[in-house]
Structures are given as C-alpha cells and as structure tokens.
C-alpha cells in the first residue's frame, strides 16, 4: 500500500496499476480533469501539478517543499508520503487563489488548454520565493508552452501574483498539513500491485538491495522522465518497478574540500543548488538543461 495526501484528502492505494501516471490517476480515477494531456512526453507543461514534500532545514525547522512536476511522466507510486496538488485544489470557498486571479486580470488565457499548467507552475514559484525576479519567472515557466495567448500577459500575471507574500489556504493550513504528512511518513516498504504488475517503494539501500535480489528483472525508477516514455509513448507495460526516490541515502548531497558527492536519486534541481553554491559560473550552463518540471524529477544519473 502507498499513502499520500490529495490536497488535504488522505488517499490509500494498493490495487492500482503501477504503470498509472499521476495525470491519468487524476483524470480517470479521481475525476479531476483540469490537468491536461498535451504531449505525454514532458515537453508542453499542460499536465503540470505540484507535489509537496516534508523537509527539515539546517536550523531544524520543518517545512513543505513544493515542486512543479509533469504529471504525464510521474507514476503514482512516487507519491508515497507526499502531498499532491492539482489546479482544482487552488480555489478555496469560492475564492480564486491569487495566481488564478492574476491570470484572469492580466488576460493570460485564450483557448485555456495550457492555462492549468501555467497556473500550477506559477503557484510553485509563489510558494518557493517571496519576491522572484524576472529571470526566476522565466525559469518557472520555461517548461510551459502556449500557442495562442502569447507570453507577455502570462509574465504579467507572474509579476502580479508573485511579488511579495500573498497568504492563502495553504499557508493557513501549513501546520496541519505538516502534521498529516508526518502521520503518513513511510515506515515500511510501499507497494502498488495489480495482477502481475507491481511497483515497490523501499526506504533504505538495504531494502533496495533485498528487493533487487528478489526481483532482478525489475526496472529501477528514480525520476521517470525517460522510463515513463516507454508507457506513454511506446505503450509498453513495465511488469516490475522499484521506485528509489524515497531512499534517503540516495538523495544526499555531501560537500568536501575536493569534491561534491551527489546521491543517484537526487533531483537535478537540488544538484544545481549545491553545484551553483560552489561553482557559480557553472550556473548558467546548468539552467540550460531541461525545464524546471523535468529537473524537479530527473536525477543526474
């Protein structure tokens, strides 16, 4: 079984197809159709959702780290112990969230197909930075494509909604959400199992070694930005997967005098922060690789 929060709703899943993407889970199993499929390959951003994960900073303070992801490339098994937020979750008690308001007021939507993805990318930007500059806004939206409105009004919406702190329901419920995430923090190996297909979610390297010994034919899943294409583009079935993204030892970044050691399951966006701190001139090159949604998923290996 895996457990996660769908906004504030606890979801416990076991008998799901492990090949099920978050996009299809939302649309076909939950009935939330705001998240769109444009390309099914992580290029257009129409399927962008936000995933929140409990983290502790250097001072020991707990907080939720929100990341924008391509739901068309994210398997449901990777949500174990996390919070999933889709575009439907932003509106609260009939009131649009500030990013949604800005998109309306700045006329940032025309046909509307890409709009949910833009909104979710801006929501993640808003949650991760109190006052992002123009470059940060461009970076947050680099993985979202629009074919009819044009980007000027969308960037105007970014500037309006992300300039300074604009508290919302997620801020008001942060302590509650942290408590709920702590309550469902994985303590044992998670599993999705449907017929002859399964995905296992270990927590330690020792667990991973045991599982890989038991299932030598298993495909290792970290970010899924390549592996998921076998399902979404080539319509193949992956009978056994082992998701390594919850293995803490594989997500460490350790800095030494002569080297930086990066865990094989560390997201590129986290790698960039560490590398940029040590090699700032390297930063421009690093940010040329992939969109933020992909970098939030993909490990370096």
Image (cartoon, rainbow, N blue to C red):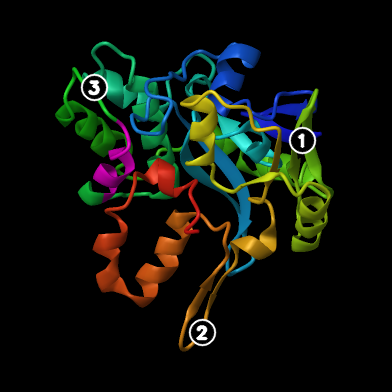
Q: Return the disc, 2 or 3, that comes first in the chain's sequence.
A: 3
Is residue 240 a member of the stretch shown in magenta? no
Please state the extent of the stretch shown in magenta in the rendering.
136-144
Q: CA distance from mark 2 to mark 3?
A: 46 Å
Tell me where residue 276 appears, x and y as whole percent.
35, 69
Residue 57 left/right relative to 128:
right
Element type where label 1 sits in the image: strand
Task: Name the mark nearer the viewer: 1 or 3.
Answer: 1
Q: Which residue is mark 3?
A: 108
Element type where label 3 sits in the image: loop
Q: CA distance from mark 1 to mark 2?
A: 36 Å
Is residue 137 a member of the stretch shown in magenta? yes
Q: Which residue is mark 2?
A: 256
Tell me where residue 91 appears, x and y as whole percent.
48, 20
Res 165 visible = no
Tell me where residue 142 appears, x and y as whole percent.
28, 40
């Amino acid at each position: 079984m895996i457990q996660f929060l769908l906004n504030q709703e606890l979801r416990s899943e076991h008998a799901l197809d492990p090949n099920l993407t978050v996009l299809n889970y939302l649309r076909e199993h939950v009935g939330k159709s705001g998240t769109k499929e444009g390309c099914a390959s992580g290029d257009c951003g129409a399927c962008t959702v936000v995933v929140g994960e409990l983290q502790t900073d250097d001072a020991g303070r707990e907080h939720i780290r929100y990341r924008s992801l391509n739901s068309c490339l994210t398997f449901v098994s990777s949500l174990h112990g996390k919070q999933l937020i889709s575009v439907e979750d932003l509106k609260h008690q009939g009131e649009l969230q500030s990013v949604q308001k800005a998109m309306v007021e700045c006329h940032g939507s025309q046909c509307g197909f890409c709009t949910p993805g833009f909104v979710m990318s801006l929501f993640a930007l808003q949650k991760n930075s109190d006052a992002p500059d123009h470059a940060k806004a461009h970076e947050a939206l680099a993985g979202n494509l629009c074919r009819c409105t044009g980007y000027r009004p969308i960037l105007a919406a970014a500037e309006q909604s992300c300039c300074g702190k604009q508290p919302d329901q997620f801020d008001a419920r942060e302590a509650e959400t942290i408590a709920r995430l702590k309550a469902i923090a994985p303590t044992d190996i998670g599993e999705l199992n449907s017929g002859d297909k399964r995905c296992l979610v270990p927590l330690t390297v020792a667990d991973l070694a045991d599982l890989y010994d038991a299932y030598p034919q298993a495909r290792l899943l970290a970010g899924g930005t390549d592996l998921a294409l076998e399902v979404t583009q080539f319509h193949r079935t992956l009978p056994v997967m082992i998701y390594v993204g919850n293995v803490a030892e594989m997500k460490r970044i350790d800095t030494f005098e002569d080297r930086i050691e990066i865990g094989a399951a560390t997201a590129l966006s986290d790698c960039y922060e560490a590398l940029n701190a040590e090699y700032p001139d390297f930063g421009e090159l690093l940010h040329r690789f992939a969109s933020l949604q992909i970098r939030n998923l993909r490990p370096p290996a």
